[in-house]
Amino acid sequence: GWGVWYVFFSNRNESVAETYEAWEQLKAEFSDVDLPPGNFDYTAESNSTWNVVLNNKNVEEGKLLGDVLNYPLTDKTTSFNYKSFTSANARDISHPIKEVLTGKEIFFSITSLEDIITSDSDLDKQEIAYTGLLVFVEFRKTPESLHNKLQGKISLEQLRQIYTGEKTYWNEIDSKLPNIKIQPFIPEEPEAIYQFKKIVLRNKPQDIANFEKIVTSQNAETTIKKAIATGIISFGTLGRIGHQCSDFYPLAIVNNNQTNQPKYRTTRSGNDPISLDDGDLCAGTYFDVENFKNYPLGYPLYVVYPNDNTRNKPGQQFAEMLGKTQQGQCLLSKVNLVHLQKIPTNLDNCKK
C-alpha cells in the first residue's frame, strides 16, 4: 500500500528531506480524506483537459482514471459521477462553472478558467494539478528539420506574429530559417484556444480577429501525423498530447529573455531539459514540476465549488482527495498532468 515505503524514506539525508517536504505533508490515500457519503454529480467541458484524462488507462491495473474516481473508497459509500457539458457556443466555455452556480444537481466543476471566478462569485476554487499548452513542429533527425533550424525554441512574440498573420514565411521569423510558408494549425479544444488567446495574444481584439481569419482547426493528433510536412506549427494541451513523443518536437518557449523547455529527461548527469541532440523523445521524459511553475504556457487545473456550507463539501473534499493526497497526485501524474509538488522518483506507486 501507500505507507509501505514511508519507513524507507524516513532515514534519508537532510537535503532530500527538504526536497520532498511538501510531499511528506500530504495525506497518504483517499481513505484519509473525510469524504461525504452519497452520490455527487460534477462536470467539465466535453472537449477539455479533464474530459481527456478521465479516459486515460495509465492508472491502477489498467482502469480508466474516471472509474477510479467514480468510487474512490473500497466500500463505495461515496460516488462522484462525471457529466460532461458541451457549451452551445464554442467561445463561451464557462458554462460548466455556471452550472455549479445555478444547478442544485451539479456540485462542482473541473476547469482551468480561474480568471472567470471573481471574489464575489459565490464560488471557491482549489488547485489539483498543473496543465498547459505544448507548441510543436516536425521532429526529424536531420539538420534541415524545422526543430533544428529553430534551435528547439520559439518566443511568445514570434508565436503572436505567426498566429496573427504578421509573419507568413519561416525566414521572416529568422533569416536563417527556410523560405517556406508557415502553416499555423490550432487544436479543436476550446480550452486550448482560450488559453492561447489569453497568454499569447493577451486577449487583444485585433490580434484575436486576425488569428481567427488565418488558422486551420483540426485535432492535435492529426496535426502531429502531418507535422512531418515542413512548415507546420501547432499546439495542444498536455492532457491530450503530453504522452506523444516520436513525430513532433515540443518547442521551448522564450519570454523576457528566459527560455523554458517543459519536457525534461533523466540523464547520467542529472535531470535536464530535452535537447536537439536527443534522438529519442520517448524514453524517460517527463514534466518537471519546479520548472513547469515558470513555464509561460502552463496554468493550474482547479476544482470549483460553491462557497456556501450546504453545498461545498463534495467539491472541497474531491479537491483535497486529488490535490492533497499522495495517491491523488500520483494518479494525476500518470495521465499527463503535472503534480503540485516534487514526488520521490523511486516510489513504485508513482511509476508510469
Image (cartoon, helix red, strand yellow):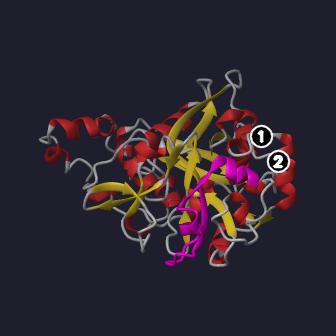
Given residues 43 and 276, the one toward you in this image is: 276
Residue in the picture at 68% in, 31% down: 117
Quadrant occupied by the C terminus: bottom left
Query: For residue 160: magenta?
Result: yes
| Residue lying furthest top | 120
Q: Position of residue 273 (x, y in %)?
A: 41, 56
In terms of image quadrants, where is residue 20? top left
Q: Which residue carries the number 2 mark?
A: 208
Q: Position of residue 53 (x, y in %)?
A: 55, 59
Where 129 sits versus 65, above or below? Answer: above
Given residues 206 and 283, the one toward you in this image is: 206
Residue 132 vs residue 93: left or right?
left
Where 129 sits versus 226, above or below? Answer: above
Note whether residue 330 is visible: yes
Given residues 328 and 240, the one toward you in this image is: 240
In the image, what residue type sits under mark 2?
Ile
Residue in the picture at 61% in, 36% down: 304
Question: What span is colored magenta in the figure?
Answer: 134-161
Where 112 sits versus 284, above or below? Answer: above
Where 242 sits versus 43, above or below? Answer: below
Given residues 107 and 292, the one toward you in this image is: 292
Q: Which residue carries the number 1 mark?
A: 203
In the image, what residue type sits under mark 1?
Asn
Note whether residue 37 is visible: no
Residue 269 vs residue 82: left or right?
left
